[in-house]
Amino acid sequence: MTLNELLTRAAELDAADPLASFASEFVPAPDGLTYLDGNSLGRPLRASREAVLEVLDDQWARGLIGSWDQWIELSRAIGDRLAAACLGASEGTTVISDSTSVNIYKLASAALDARPGRADIVADANEFPTDLYVLDGLARSRGGRLRLVDSDPVRGFDPGDVSSLLDDEVALVSLSHVNYRSGALADMAAVTAAAHEAGALALWDLCHSVGVVPTALEDCGVDLAVGCTYKYLNGGPGSPAFLHVAPRHLGTLLQPIHGWFGQSRQFDMDPTYDPVPTIERFLVGTPPILSITPIGPAVDQVGRAGIEAIGAKSRSLTELLIAAHDLLLAPLGFTLGTPRDPDRRGGHVTVRHPEAQAISAAIRSEVSVVGDFRRPDGIRLSPAPLYVSHVEVVEALSRMAEVVSAGAHARYREQVGRVT
Amino acid sequence: MTLNELLTRAAELDAADPLASFASEFVPAPDGLTYLDGNSLGRPLRASREAVLEVLDDQWARGLIGSWDQWIELSRAIGDRLAAACLGASEGTTVISDSTSVNIYKLASAALDARPGRADIVADANEFPTDLYVLDGLARSRGGRLRLVDSDPVRGFDPGDVSSLLDDEVALVSLSHVNYRSGALADMAAVTAAAHEAGALALWDLCHSVGVVPTALEDCGVDLAVGCTYKYLNGGPGSPAFLHVAPRHLGTLLQPIHGWFGQSRQFDMDPTYDPVPTIERFLVGTPPILSITPIGPAVDQVGRAGIEAIGAKSRSLTELLIAAHDLLLAPLGFTLGTPRDPDRRGGHVTVRHPEAQAISAAIRSEVSVVGDFRRPDGIRLSPAPLYVSHVEVVEALSRMAEVVSAGAHARYREQVGRVT
């Protein structure tokens, strides 16, 4: 296949794309920018911008303290819409709360409490670091330890890789649905079943799948889940995370940070903690309303687009991206850092090159293509289905190939931001 | 003294008020509203609104992921400015992070770890509930218990009330600088010294004092402090909290939620937790940028006004408020729920009445005076020095007295919001 054939194919896919119109709902990005970093920070919706202005001007400045009558519901209300739109989960199982790291801590701690006599946690050696830090700290505090799945850096792990680590000292299996670096997609149902068979609970980190990979938490029997809202969910920088607890565990699991947003009759100000039996018992303190607000319109957009349609477009975009890699980048020394099998792949593709860091900086500056450098040698490219077209993907990789074949990345070897 | 004399006195105080011009820096509140609930949610500054718009339109929508180069510094940068403007604390001791409840959990847990063999915590029986919930849960998880100071509901506690509970099983004394209900101001230096003498650490909750009561954390020898930013600091609904750790404890105390924002060389993505030796080790996950943003201009305003000048105006406003209570409300069955001694009083005054809940609703609807009902019988009135004048305070209490003497609150007995 030639570049022209690839572009023709991309144009055909765009012409038939049922989601094409959603891109116009976003605040425009700078002219000429191809933003393939939606898995680090998604773009803002116009409706989210308007919602923030309404909070600022109407609710905060004019409604003042009285607006808490509305705000108090937000964590649960958006959680319910997220559960329905993206998670395959029921009402009353999901809330917006804190950061992903804090939520992992709360849920993993609750899981350890629920499995007395067990203190070990199984996690992926290639997991996003904050998960490992939190889980290791927790396991050690209970006299246990982290057992790491020796997963393949590209292919990820199979259910058998996890099973082989399980025994009656493991309280919890905590894994990412999609690996942050490789994009490898886990078999959620099989791994969860294996955890249950060994008497452990399963906690899934959905940061890199939520809003792009259709997910069926309840069909998979998942016990616990967390995820961020600022990647494919377009909630904005550092927008609070979500947490999910299966209905069968509500009212029995208890998280360790006993805050007043989990309290029965919260405004009675009783001195003794008496947590509600519902999902709100996993809330802690006062939620940051300005940062939660953009999540609402973004989740609703996913609901209107349909997560199955988003997932289908994501597979189509990543397949084309891999074809463009093979045609344009592989001859320049790139290798693919992501599974080719679409059933083993999430919404992003990592291309690997020894000079990845300099290339990532060069394509940003020279041709306005924004990806995401990931040590040691990866550039993550994430075509967010709601605002990236097939043609954009092919053109971006074509421009990237031109930069590298011209050697233009050489002078970027020293120029890298801290947050890359 | 008559009402006219009180109004004349108020007008004189306003004419001589060096902070009078700061009120014009806020986004206007609705016409005719007297907002005396700044100790639940302060009003927005125009500069904060502009800063949020800049984040939305320039940094998020256009700068996208590249803006993290700026955002990554915010927690520490605003923390430093807050330490200097309000806390009497050095650079590098204070960060914006999480909620107050989560920060109490992190710091109290670190304190318990630092005092092996001790697991009890001393707190105030009249403390804001979330503090008690968090501390009780933590103490129990270590096999200890909460010891409650039997404080006076109006006058608060004396250092001796705390000392009498201390022995070598107490790891931590955790108290509020200003009581959320009565406004009683604690003797921070004496109580901290008593805690140290017994071998315990002292953690202060500054939620109801920060930005209105001059505070000298380092001069008082305080070990740890937390506080919210949405009351007198005008950070907006649920804006993230701050935490402070004395320089002598940096690098030794370790909090339990090991997140990637506390990690050395954060973006190296090392799999093992190696926390920085600085205040950032008390950070956890990705901070909510939109909600942090308004804190910056608000802290800077406090810095420009000067916390000593703010504290002086606060004492002047609350003294006038108490005089107006004595003249106008006491004859209607009100009693004062706040110390009369200005050295024992924070920035708000609670007036008590058996019908407080109905009266609080009535004055809001009938005469646009917003206070804050606190069970069982209190209405907190908080004249925020940066946007409330002396005349406003007297006029508000005069309107309140008219409502109550006309019996207009009777029909509000059933009409109360959940968040009151």
Image (cartoon, coloured by chain):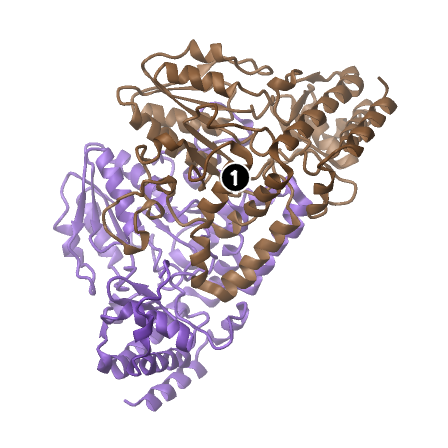
Chain colours: A brown, B purple
Q: How many marks?
A: 1
Image location (x, y in percent) of residue A149: 47, 14
Q: Name the residue under label 1.
A: A82
Residue name at image x 66 percent, y 24 percent: A349
Image location (x, y in percent) of residue A175: 47, 23
Image location (x, y in percent) of residue A372: 65, 31
Picture quarter with the N terminus of chain B: bottom left
Residue sitting at the far left: B164
Q: Which of B224 and B399 is in front in this view?
A: B399
| Image quadrant assignment for residue B68 | top right
Tell me the subunit letter for badge 1: A
Q: Is residue A2 visible?
A: yes
Q: Nearer the viewer, residue B204 or A151?
A: A151
Q: Is residue B240 above or below residue B281?
A: below
Q: Can residue A413 be seen in this view?
A: no
Q: Is residue B257 above or below residue A259?
A: above
Picture quarter with the C terminus of chain B: bottom left
Dot 1: few (<14), some (14–19), or many (≥20) neighbours within 10 Å? Answer: many
A81 lies left or right of A389: left
Q: Is mark 1 on a helix, strand or loop?
A: helix
Q: In this view, does B195 lie above or below B207?
A: above
Q: What's under tag 1, amino acid-wise? A: Leu
